[in-house]
Image (cartoon, rainbow, N blue to C red):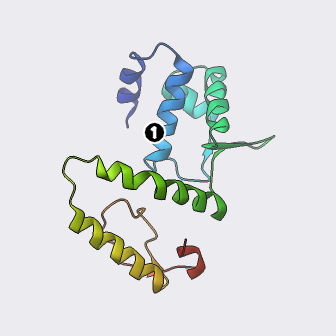
Amino acid sequence: MNLGDIIADRADHANTTVWVADVLRRRIAAGELPPGTKLSEQQLAASMQVSRNTLREAFTMLSLESVVTRFPNRGVFVAAPDAAAVREIYRVRRMLEPAAVLWGPDLDVERLDAVVAGARDARDRGMCRKWPPPTRPSTRPWSPCPAASSCSS
């Protein structure tokens, strides 16, 4: 997302704080701002052409959603979920995704079954992908998990 796209997108929003939070949330979700990245108020305010106060309000919104973490006297950082948080995310996904898949118009059950079987086999062998997450197709090779127990659910 370049500066021109960011500024052009801003015109569609009545609430600048919500717009800033949306832009940051999308950039974090897209991996442009990886976990642990420090978010510089000065740089972000300048690039998004908003006040630092507006940016701080957006940080507050994202902090309440656990998207960012604030550290007093250090700044705001993209949240880095711990193992318990990741397990909870996958527990919720396990409940929601089957229903979402059933609603899909072009469901390829055979391919989905193959992906699930491959993932289970990799888990059982202590192998996992480092990136991207399993919901994205990839040609990257499987690599040993640093802690095989973290691969199991």
In x, y percent, where is residue 143?
44, 80
From what the image shows, is residue 19 above or below residue 32?
Answer: above
Q: Identify the residue shown where x is 51% and y is 47%.
A: 33
Q: Would residue 8 appear left or right of 53 to someone viewing this image?
A: left
Label 1 crowd (10 A; few <14 / some 14-19 / many >=20): some
Dot 1 amino acid type: Arg
From what the image shows, is residue 88 above or below residue 38?
Answer: below
- Can you name the residue that lies furthest to the top here? 14
Could you tell me if residue 147 is visible in this image?
A: no
- Residue 83 picture quarter: bottom right
Q: Identify the residue shown where x is 63% and y is 43%.
A: 68
In the rendered image, the quadrant that contains the N terminus is top left
Question: In the rendered picture of this protein, how many numbered marks are placed on residues?
Answer: 1
Q: Identify the residue shown where x is 46% and y is 79%.
A: 123
In x, y percent, where is residue 55?
61, 26
Could you tell me if residue 97 is visible in this image?
A: yes
Q: Would residue 117 appear left or right of 84 to someone viewing this image?
A: left
Q: Nearer the viewer, residue 87 or 4?
A: 87
- Residue 117 picture quarter: bottom left
In x, y percent, where is residue 28?
50, 45
Q: Identify the residue shown where x is 20% and y is 60%.
A: 108
In the rendered image, the quadrant that contains the C terminus is bottom right
- Can you name the residue that lies furthest to the bottom here? 125
Q: Nearer the viewer, residue 97 or 32?
A: 97
From what the image shows, is residue 146 above or below residue 5?
Answer: below
- Residue 50 picture quarter: top right
Q: Nearer the viewer, residue 86 or 105?
A: 105
Q: Which residue is mark 1?
A: 26
